[in-house]
Image (spheres, rainbow, N blue to C red):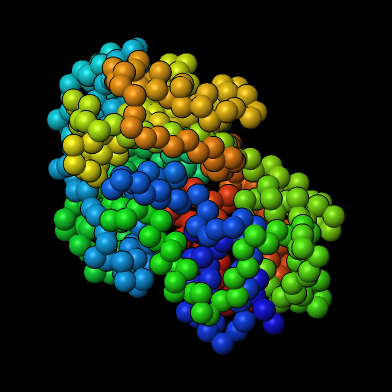
Amino acid sequence: MTTVILGGGLSGLSTAYYLTKKLASNPITLIESSHRLGGWIKSNHSKDIIFEEGPRTIRPHGDAAPNTLSLIEDLGLSDAVIPINSSHPAAKNRMIFVKDQLHSLPSSIKGLFKTQMPFSKPLILQLMKDITTPRKVIEDESIYDFVNRRFGKEVADYLISAMICGICAGNSKEISVNFLMKTLFRYEQDYGSISKGLIWNFFKKIKKPEIGSLSMKARQEKWSVYSLENGLEMLPKALHDNIKNKVSIETSTKCTDIEIFPELNNVILHLQNGKNISGSHVISCIPSEQLGILLQKQHPVLSDLLLQIKSATVAVVNVHFDKKLISREGFGFLVPPGEKLPILGVTYDSCIFPRGENTVLTVMMGGAWFEELFGKNPEKDFLLKIALDQLKKTLNISEKPVQSNVSILEKCIPQYVVGHSEKIEKINNYINKNKLPLSLCGASYYGVGINDVILSSKNAVDRLLKI
């Protein structure tokens, strides 16, 4: 019978890709409720300028990164990769806006030994607090509380709070350390401190997985981040091109209810157009809240767990000026929530990827504070005005942009609050105990980044083939 993929974002397209590689003879159907594929990744082109509505770069580091680079190789996109290496200003100069000023964060070991505003003493002294801080035996806590305990209030307020705004547009006082900083948290729990854990594991012989030629190139050339020459939407488009003749794809098709019959190894998806799709297994690549609603009638316990994973809304304001306006080049800056500004940060797109004598910036707004700041349904002109006011305040830019774009990405980034790992375990236990022909992947569960999402799709397919 048919394997049904629910959702046509990056996760759904990746799942279809991995399924077609390993189950070429089995029928596969992909259902997407919107009119387009690709999810939150969208690259708008105008006058040789690219406005990224969603993610704009991918990190080549971390356990999940080699898988993405291998996928890019397999899709024939290697020549389209635009790397930013570690010596580039965008890699070396990352900033925070604190106390009405921009401050560069240390970009080298040497920088840790200097007192740099807004910190009152060298960061190395604050990091060394970890050595004398006793272990607190707990299952989980917020990233803010963890960092505050081990490194002090300044690191928590300025560095970590800003970083969490950049990663998931979230509140560091709510986000789980046992998920987004799991390794450091385990070091404290297992060894008594992060420092001891780092030293102990430094001498361990860890077998490194084999990596592809593009991953090797990224290491040798010391990439910091990378993108694709025509924008990141090249990736979902290439995935679509790869699968379109192998998968039945239905867009503008909304699922309204799911019925699961484990004893028959059957799943029925009821669609808004009155039709039904039947399959032997469904792989959900939609946000957990959406899936929770679809399972409410038949599996209320599972539905409740899925509905507990909330997501934040982010407004993305892209602006283009026809002159160079940034004096201090870099990746951009983040704003810690304590500064009480209505923006999360600004990305210097034209510094990262130069577009001639132009300045292209992206202002990120809202996140965990969206409704508090802007109400439930703000007008786009209202958001644009706030973004331009903040560019004047933070970067002294008072010019009017020659073009702009405002996108409201509703519930786009899941918030992994304290207890997230336990929640995911309960969800998986319920599915396994009830032998549901259901797999979960995507940003709601195992990581919000592009690398995490693609790897979650691969892992979901691998697990399915073992059933």
Camera-side residue of 15 and 180: 15
Residue 24 image offset from top left, x and y in percent: 52, 84
Instruction: Please tell me which residue is depicted at 70% across the width and 58% down the height of the picture.
Output: 254
Camera-side residue of 414 and 27: 27
Q: In the rendered picture of this protein, how many numbered marks are placed on residues?
A: 0
Residue 259 is at least partly visible in this image: no
Camera-side residue of 396 and 381: 381
Q: Is residue 466 above or below residue 221?
A: below
Image quadrant containing the N terminus: bottom right
Residue most toward the bottom? 25
- Left or right of 413, for residue 361: left
Instruction: Please tell me which residue is depicted at 45% across the width and 18% down the height of the picture.
Output: 341
Q: Is residue 349 above or below residue 84?
A: above
Residue 253 falls in image quadrant: bottom right
Residue 308 image offset from top left, x and y in percent: 69, 42
Residue 87 image offset from top left, x and y in percent: 15, 43
- Left or right of 140, for residue 295: right
Q: Is residue 66 above or below residue 296?
A: below
Instruction: Please tell me which residue is depicted at 81% across the width and 56% down the height of the picture.
Output: 299
Residue 163 falls in image quadrant: top left
- Left or right of 126, for residue 299: right
Residue most toward the right? 297
Image quadrant containing the C terminus: bottom right
Residue 161 falls in image quadrant: top left
Residue 62 image offset from top left, x and y in percent: 35, 53
Residue 232 is at least partly visible in this image: yes
Q: Is residue 233 above or below residue 336?
A: below
